[in-house]
Every structure is written in C-alpha cells, then in structure tokens.
Image: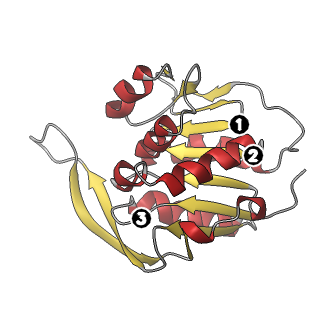
Amino acid sequence: MTTSKKILIITGDAGESFEILYASHRLLEAGYEPVIAAPTVKRMNLVMHDFEPCWDTYVERKGYLIESDISFDDVNTDDYHSVLIPGGRAPEFLRNDQRVINIVKAFYNSNKYVFAICHGVQILVTAGLVDGRKIACYEHVKFEVESVGGIYVTPDQAVQDGRIITGKTWQSHPEFYQIVFKCLERSKETEPEVQAVLN
C-alpha cells in the first residue's frame, strides 16, 4: 500500500470554485495533504457555474481566488497517493497541455487512483482512459465520452471502474466522495471492483 498522504489536484484558471475548495477542505479534514498543481505557480481565478431561469445552459460567474502550490513541471507522481481533477472550464484548456496528459497517464500506469468530476472527465478522454469504462460526468460531456468508447452512466451520480472514479457535478459530491475515501483507505494491491452510487 502506498504510504503517501499527498493528493494531487489538477486545475487552473476557470476551475470550479466549489469542486476545488470542497476537495481541498475535505481531504485536509480527513488527514490528507492536497497539493494544487496548475500551469504555473500563481493566484488563480476560479469560477462558479450555476443555472438561471430561462437559460438553456449554465452561466459562469467569477468565483474565489486560490493559490496554486506547484506547477505541472514540478509534479513527481511518485510523491502522491492519487490525482483528483475537478471541473469548471479549466479542463477544456488543460486537456491541451501535454504535461497534464502525461501526469494523468503516469498515475494510471502506476496503478494509482484517478478521480475526476464534472468537466474534469474531459482530461481523461484526451488521455485515452475512458474507452470501455463506466463514466459519470456532466451530461454535456456525454458525447465526448461515448465518442471514444466510454459508457456514460445514468442515473448514477458517481461510479468506480477499476482505478478510475468519476462523478457528474458538484451536486454529486456526497456520492463521489463516498467512493473517493473508500479508495484512499484501500490497499494498492487490492483491485477495486466496479461499483456505483445511485441517486
């Protein structure tokens, strides 16, 4: 079993405020050390996605400011137990950063857990990690998931398929983090079974 208590969080400007802050605080509460990695070490502008009456899609508002701890260049995946990818608009551009793809693949290839929620799944798609897997994500990422052979789950709010754990949106936090924390305490040598948390 890996002894590291560090969890890498990958995000950037326009990351979803609630998903990033909730992850950081929840991990700290449980005795883990969240480390936020971004394109550079700087103060990032987070966002809040919400829904307004008469809008067909979500609206984006300015969210909190948060400092990244390290840049992607400074990430050594051997130092971490697992990686977590929040949503927001950040994954849309981070998936084009080869450093991010290399980092996520390195976690997966090292038999470590990869957690992603909402639009964070876009990075898993680009990294080639969803083919043949059950995936929960924001409903409008469904096409991307299915286009590369992933299986979009419904009505599950969160799902585990091997070492890939995904959730739909920040509204799925209760179900998503139930699985996340079971995984964090599970032995690295024990291959997790496919499971889901329903609505």
How far is the residue under mark 3 from the one under mark 1?
24 Å
Image point 68% across, 26% down: which residue?
Answer: 195
Image point 47% across, 44% down: which residue?
Answer: 123
Amino acid identity at mark 3: Gly
Q: Name the element at disc 1.
A: loop
Q: Name the element at disc 3.
A: loop
Front one among 71 and 172: 71
Residue tagged 1: 163
Residue tagged 2: 112
The answer, for residue 147, to whether it is visible in the render is yes
Front one among 49 and 67: 67
4 lies left or right of 48: right
Q: Residues within 10 Å of mark 3 (few under 14, many from 20)?
A: many
Q: Farthest residue in the front direction?
A: 98
Q: Position of residue 79 (x, y in %)?
A: 76, 65
Amino acid identity at mark 1: Arg
Can you tell which mark lies on residue 12? 3
Mark 1 or mark 2, earlier in chain? 2
Q: Which quadrant of the structure image shows residue 187?
A: top right
72 lies left or right of 31: left
Amino acid identity at mark 2: Lys
Task: Say if mark 1 contacts mark 2, CB within 8 Å.
Answer: yes
Residue 187 vertical position relative to residue 154 in the rendered view, above or below: below
